[in-house]
Amino acid sequence: MLPVNPERFLADLHMLRSFGAAGVGKGVVRPAYSDADIAARAWLAERMREAGLAVHVDPVGSVFGLAEGRSLLMGSHSDSQPEGGWLDGALGVIAALEVARSSVEAGGPAVSVVSFEDEEGRFGVTTGSAVWSGNLPLAKADGLTDRDGVTFADARARMPGRSEGFVDPSRFSGFLEMHIEQGPVLDREGEAIGVVDAIVGIRDMKITFVGEQNHAGTTPMQGRRDAFQALSRFNTLIAERFANVVTPATVWTIGHVALHPNASSIVPGKVTFSMQWRDGDADRLKRMEAIIRETAEEVAAKRGFDLSFGPMLGLEPVDMDARLRGALESAAVAEVPGRWRSMPSGALHDATNVSKLMPVAMLFVPSIGGISHAFGEDTDEADLVTGLNVLARAVDALG
Amino acid sequence: MLPVNPERFLADLHMLRSFGAAGVGKGVVRPAYSDADIAARAWLAERMREAGLAVHVDPVGSVFGLAEGRSLLMGSHSDSQPEGGWLDGALGVIAALEVARSSVEAGGPAVSVVSFEDEEGRFGVTTGSAVWSGNLPLAKADGLTDRDGVTFADARARMPGRSEGFVDPSRFSGFLEMHIEQGPVLDREGEAIGVVDAIVGIRDMKITFVGEQNHAGTTPMQGRRDAFQALSRFNTLIAERFANVVTPATVWTIGHVALHPNASSIVPGKVTFSMQWRDGDADRLKRMEAIIRETAEEVAAKRGFDLSFGPMLGLEPVDMDARLRGALESAAVAEVPGRWRSMPSGALHDATNVSKLMPVAMLFVPSIGGISHAFGEDTDEADLVTGLNVLARAVDALG
């Protein structure tokens, strides 16, 4: 196994959180292209150089530390949410740096490092890796604006030292990303490592029931076409019908509800709500979609509601590469036997985009209490080091 | 029976809708203290004078046409919703005028007429009759503002010819109000008259469930404390539990829902929603409240939600006076045998306030399609005349 240095790894991780430190717990405020993000990337580039890697800042500000010749790529992102945790993204970048650095020192396999830009979506969604992978054309990305109306084109122009070209993906044999779980499973089960089997696919659409707006005093219950009641009935029925289709890892959410006119003395005539569901299996996503559409139609037909479905936004599930994943599993067995699991990633990651270019695999460490995207996000340092060791062992084995 | 004149009654009703005519169907735009409302009240006062009544415009702009000595009071309101129908309120005022006028002509019982101001609540709720009845002190009303920030004090100052004092309620033996149903029952059943047995009581409160806001991808269904799911479960359970308590006239409504943060990718951590219920029986309102509180507590306890109840707004049910109501029923039997019903009023009316001062009763005529508070509000003219005849017959019988 590569002789990684846990103290150096943790010291760099804590150093990175000094850029944009929130002053609340270990939290950071380091959104893409902020002064803190730009400074952190400059520091990171210097660390890459010190490790013997060639720095390449691509046109959108993703920072690569390139090993010579064909190499394995490792990393994640160092930008944060507007109120973010110290580990989300940063952990994967610094772990990659430590593995690459150790490998150079020990004459091990060639490892390159990357910190993608704007994974947290100040502009798009996983913007830096989306542009690199071709999922999002640069010209289109340049037109995106943040909440304050700043364009992506103007924001990326702030990043110093950018190259004119993108890194050729064919120089990489595959991509490994370590990340915090951002969910409660490993922490709750007392496990140290999750080897990701798939990044789940997402389906998201708006559904609208239009009934009849009426006076809440003079309209008998029997004649009502109350849009909230249609929503509640739909919600109850899909939960019953999903029961035979889903696994414990499947999730679905009604997170957005807009009632009209939304007044306590008026029977609501219209509701538009979001229906989002995620699973690692594309067939299951499709079966769930059929249940959703049939149930909504049944609820609408029964009481004479008009029904409409918005456009369905979809991201396909991404299976992890068998060879890379196998190396992570073997390393987990060696490091923490009986204290790891195979699990899907319910969240999107840069690896989703990178899978268009090369084989990918991912590793999770626990999130205490499942908390992320908040200043309170944290992981026991022993678990961070375990993650580093599993990565190092897998890279060694992959050669 | 008093020799009412249907043509004159309908002509006055159509004349009244020329004040603030919307130009859409028969709709009117005549909110309280608007130029159209002030002009309509001036016209109405003149009509009262012509009928031999003494006009008294009270400090808030309610227009009384007073018979000499002790009399029965009849009427409703002539202000409208911002987009209102031609009959809501206006019908009861013009029918009262026609009955009083005919009674003067025929030497019948003494009948006074009133058009209360701001029944539609540009400022408060049934403001004019609320002030007269003492339910709302004038000093408090004066501080109320409309949506544009205009105070009630400034608005009522616009009304010309106001007296300094209020009419002494002890000069009236009782109050009769005819109104459109504003609901679908009479129209659907092909009936001409509803004799109101009670104006329902209203209970209205906000309920809040606080669960846990989480990532919609990484949080397994099993560990979620999803506030929308709590709301949906609560809604389903109360419908089941109300079944043994309610009558076909009981209504309840969840008309306002505020999810937080209301985003499709976030498990909602908080929901505040309105729970409103109405019934003519105060005991039933209380039994429903107990079910609501117990069910919310049960749902909250089961999955660890924090639960809070906002202040409960309540209006007590108002029973109609037995003697006045009996007179209306006898008149309905004589005019439209088998085509009338006893029914509650699901909406508030000026009669609710006036019941503090004297015995009250109410009569409904059908609303086509149950439509009101909209330009499309209408009633067959034959039904309007039937309502007039029932009123006239009842007044004659009451002596």
Image (cartoon, coloured by chain):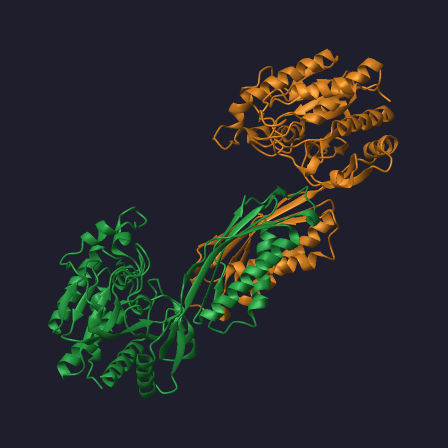
Chain colours: A green, B orange
User: In the rendered image, is residue A222 in sight?
Assistant: yes
Quarter of the image with the C terminus of chain B in it:
top right
Q: Quadrant of the N terminus of chain B?
A: top right
Determine the image quadrant of residue B280. top right
Residue depicted at x 57% and y 64%: A238
| Residue pictured at 79% horizontal, 35% vertical | B321
Q: In the picture, residue B169 is in which quadrant? A: top right
Residue displayed at 75% across by 34% down: B364
Depth check: B148 or A4 in front? A4
In the rendered picture of this protein, how many numbered marks are placed on residues?
A: 0
Position above or below: B34 against A42? above
User: Residue B239's x, y, as percent?
Assistant: 66, 57
Observer-nearest residue: A89 or A246? A246
**A138 shown above or below A376:** above
Q: Which residue extends farthest front?
A: A170
Q: In this view, does A164 lie to the left or right of B363?
A: left
Q: In this rendering, does residue B198 appear at all? A: no
Q: Give coordinates of residue B43: x percent, y percent.
A: 64, 15
User: How far across and down, in percent of the image, does residue A12 sit?
Assistant: 20, 71
Q: In this view, does B305 lie to the left or right of B191?
A: left
Q: Position of residue B325 (x, y in %)?
A: 81, 34
Q: Nearer the viewer, residue A323 or A161?
A: A323
Residues B341 and A21: in front is B341
Q: Left or right: A382 with respect to B63?
A: left
